Amino acid sequence: MTDRQSKPGSIVPTDAAPLRTLTAVMAVMCFLAMLSVGAMLLINRAVAQWASGLASEVTVQLPQLSSRDMDQDLATLTELLAEVDGVKGVTILDRKEGEKLLAPWIGEDGLDALPIPRLIRVVVDDKHQPDFAAMEVQLQAAVPTARLDTHRKWEAELRRMASTLTMISSVVLALISLSAVAMVIFAARAVLEANRNVVEVLHIAGADDDFIANQINRRFVAAGFWSGLIGLTGGVAMFLALGYWDIGENSGVASAARGLFYLPQEGDWRSLAWFLVVPIAATSIALVTSRMALKRMLGEAQ
Amino acid sequence: MLQLDAVGLRYGNGPEVLRDVSVRLEAGEFAFLTGASGAGKTSLLRLLFLALRPTRGRLELFGEDVMSLHRKALPKLRRRIGVVFQDFRLLDHLSTFDNVALPLRILGQKPEAYKRDVKDILQWVGLGDKLEALPPVLSGGEKQRAAIARAVISKPDILLADEPTGNVDPALAKRLLHLFSELNRQGTTVLLATHDESLIAQSNATIWHLEQGKLQVS
């Protein structure tokens, strides 16, 4: 017995042109899906980082007023803050540090003449945060000009931006999936049309729709799998290339892309599993859609 | 095994190509279906291998009323029918071996289970040396024999053949008739459509004669 007889020939011709086109188009779609998933991960990771920094720190501002003794007020507030439940550390930022924070916006010249407010950095316990409303009342009772900035407004803005961008990415992914479904249906019709003779012979020989759909379905699964793999490889290569692009400079895109693969934070490797969703989704779409479409079309054909 | 009662068939809104066909084929019988070109032989065969349904009348196959059967029940009946097409309908991308094995693959058999049977039947029809040949390189007679081998490999209850000797020389036609008779002796019911009078004369089988859509049995 020859090998060919041990391994029977494929009932549907293997060189079906519509499937090659489908693989190519779906590979491009998977690549776009990878970019969308990557962007979503980067945004969420950046926002989580910023938000966690904001949540673990609050600032007390003390404006320069000639009527107040700044050193006395700072000492009072420091002493008071240190005793608040949930406060882990209190640091008075000196005037130079305050100037450094302003320099990027208004330049370094003339900062000496400005009445820059003094800042107290208060590190709070993430898990057992102090009662900020009560803290502010306490602070203002001791020093009426003190202002407490809990950064909540910024954190809310960041989270809103992240959820909007995540939603946009999700819509893009949904549109890509819909296009893939349409492509698979189109290709299934083309494959059936190209193999009308084979399908007719199979029907007359007693094959049911499931048997015929299985013969063709395998090709679609292979097309989906390979396109997913090509898209995944292309997407990962794209992010790695972006990371290398201008590694010497402090480019935001490059450093973000680098962060995705080179500098993952603790537990972040798990989020990269989202990329695997792309080939899995491509294979599943090819499998389910082609099967449903083929069975429907085979039913119509009889 | 097979019974038609007042069966009529028309394509779309066209005229009836088969009219009031009533006939019966018993298990183990051998019959010829004759008639001039265009008399409706192929249409009648298409009805019998369930590629079409009658537009009127009653068609009973293996005790089942075909008219009332759901589409999903048809494959099971079709597996009991072997068909030899006038134009062979071999799949050009498959080897002769794989073409003949097709009905067994549809039945879910594995290559290990069917390889011996396929080789034996190809040997029997004289194609033992053409296992790997693709249909485009086979001669008309070889294709015909491969098509016959495919039709009988799954040991169908009934064999329907449409002009099986139409593309072969008289000597091969005689050999093919012998082959069909042999199958019939082994228990397969055979209905052979032909307008080859000399072939019919070599046998004393029942003759179904179709003329302008009307059937007469002699």
Image: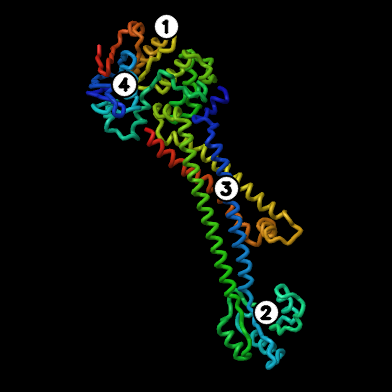
Q: Tell me which chain the residue with mark 3 is part of.
A: A
Q: Which residue type does callout 3 highlight?
A: Cys
Q: Residue A121 carries which label?
A: 2
Residue neighbourhood size for the residue with mark 1, other residues' Cα within 10 Å, grouped as few (<14), some (14–19), many (≥20): some
Residue where numbered disc 4 is placed: B44
Residue where numbered disc 3 is placed: A30
Q: Say if mark 1 contacts mark 4, CB within 8 Å.
A: no
Based on the displayed image, in which of its 4 quarters is residue A164 positioned? bottom right
Kindly identify the residue that appears in the image at 47 percent across and 41 percent down.
Answer: A185
Residue A271: % across, % down: 60, 57
Instruction: Indicate whether A161 appears above or below B1.
Output: below
Q: What element carries label 1?
A: helix
Q: Tell me which chain the residue with mark 2 is part of.
A: A
Instruction: Indicate whether A67 appears above or below B59.
Output: below
- Camera-near label (2 vs 4) is 4
How far apart, in angstroms, are the residues tagged by discs 3 and 4?
51 Å
